[in-house]
Image (spheres, rainbow, N blue to C red):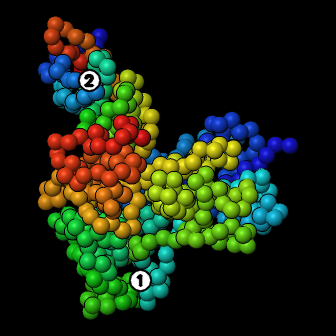
Amino acid sequence: MAEFVAVSGAGDLEEGEMQAFDVRGTKIAVANVGGTLHAFGDTCTHMACSLAGGDLEGTTVICPCHGSEFDVTSGAVLQGPARKPVETYETRIEGDSLEVEG
Amino acid sequence: MPQTFVIVGASLAGGGAAATLREEGFDGRVILIGAEPQPPYERPPLSKEYLRRESSFEQALSQPLDFYAENGIETRFGVRVTRVDAAEKVVELDHGERVAYDKLLVATGGRNRRIPIPGIELGGIYGLRTVADSDRIRAEIAPARKAVVVGMGFIGSEVAASLRQSGVEVTVVDRNTVPLRRVLGEEVGRVVADVHRDFGTELIFEDRVAAFEGAGRVERVTTQGGRRIECDFAVVGLGTEPVTDLLAGTGAKIDNGVVVDEFCQTNVEGIYAAGDVANHYHPVFERHIRVEHWQNALKQGPAAARSMLGSDEPYGEIPWFWSDQYEHNLQYAGFHTEWDELVVRGSTAERSFVAFYRKGGRVLAAVAINRGRDLRRSIPLIKAQEEIEAAKICDPDVDLRTLAGAPSLR
């Protein structure tokens, strides 16, 4: 059973924005794409840069360091140099706050 | 009769072109020929994480080993093409075999420039281009050993950083006043120099190597300025030159590489070029440019393959590259050889900035240190080729994405 952890502040993200949160010791990025929140591993699988420090274009997150691109809905690599996908996490809204599978 | 497309250069550009031919549905023969014994791989790690033993060669491979066979791509690795016979449409291999082609892509890349410095033939002196080169340097790395790095371009700077990070004592000799001066200029070069000094690398500028000395192996480097630097090994990074010899006699225009149009096509029917070797007509900069970087090889190879299949889409990617040195991430986008104004957004003292190379009010290129997001957001400004107010570019409250017409970053 997946356990859900409340992520304070993630509910305030505006459309097109993303932010990294520490969820039980794991850096998880949350992106707001058209009102839907997507949670994924914040650490780029190429050289460990924070993806939330990059850009979000639609459902694509672009790493600020070396330009790797990932699909925030699936974690898949869309463009190297990264080879390995990032994790994605289930999200749910409980009351006013966002909860991420952690 | 199925067509045969031959690709010379089992490189990032060449391998990518082969893959693209199949992705686009080409059902003829694809023959990929490379001088190195390995299948196509990515070179950026060779001066960085691979050199520091933080990543494996397998991680650098462009495709899984079985990719080529699975996709019906015939490979000849460890074989050099000595000559192209454009009249007969045949390439000649170094063991005498002749391979006929209907269309040919030249993706032979570059080779390290050989500078006739006395003693350069001694043991323990390396260039860095291939994984074999990187392996030879790796074998020399051990804490407290001493190395001299000659030339502080991108390869020299990255190697110096990786050696230092691996505990080697490093001295760099460069003829300019700062690292990367030719590309980045004095102001940005100074920032890079300070980063290297902070890590204890000794930098000797405005000096040149007079000789490598030693009995069989290099033991010291002497400079024209009178320095004597004891060392255990040396790495020379004084630039590369495009490998174009195979096209001699074909009539293909050679000028700073293989001259191609915006479709990566040479002046000889059926012959194309891509990657480091190609001097390509860039539709945004409206001039020929030759780019020796990863992204260009990654994207221009496939673009050339599509042209070979009849596509009429010009290749117009804005050149972009990164260079990681110590914990700092440097990125560059655009193309410039001269500029009349450098506009800085952020702080060079804090090593967090983007510097814009402008000419006549237009942004030709930008370099960022630890500001990757801003750098990517600068690419549309470069693409737009519009005059943009310097004050707006520098204003940290102005989102760079709002300054150029196109909202997309690509």
Instruction: Quadrant for residue B273, please give it.
Output: bottom right
Position of residue B239 relative to residue A40, above or below, is below
Bin the neighbour count of mark 2 within 10 Å (Cα to Cα): few under 14, some 14-19, many 20 and up.
Answer: some
Q: Which mark is residue A15?
A: 2
Q: Which mark is residue B263?
A: none
Residues at marks 2 and 1, CA–CA distance in whole angstroms: 62 Å
Q: Nearer the viewer, residue B388 or B202?
A: B388
Position of residue A34 relative to residue B5, above or below, is above
Answer with left or right where residue B13 lies relative to residue B229: right
Where is the C terminus of chain B found, in terms of image quarters?
Answer: top left
Residue at 40% in and 29% down: A71
Report which residue position mark 1 lands on. B217
Residue B4 percent coordinates (x, y): 77, 49
Residue at 16% in and 65% down: B198
Residue A74 percent coordinates (x, y): 40, 24
Nearer the observer: mark 2 or 1; the answer is 2
Q: The disc labelled 2 sits on which kind of residue?
A: Glu
Where is the N terminus of chain B found, in terms of image quarters?
Answer: top right
Q: Is residue B6 visible?
A: yes
Position of residue B116 relative to residue A85, above or below, is below
Q: Nearer the viewer, residue B340 or A10?
A: B340
Instruction: Quadrant for residue B76, please give it.
Output: bottom right
Q: Chain of mark 2?
A: A
> Which type of secondary structure does the marked residue at label 1 adopt?
loop
> Which type of secondary structure does the marked residue at label 2 adopt?
loop
Answer with left or right where residue A18 lies relative to residue B255: left
Q: Chain of mark 1?
A: B
Instruction: Quadrant for residue B23, please give it.
Output: top right
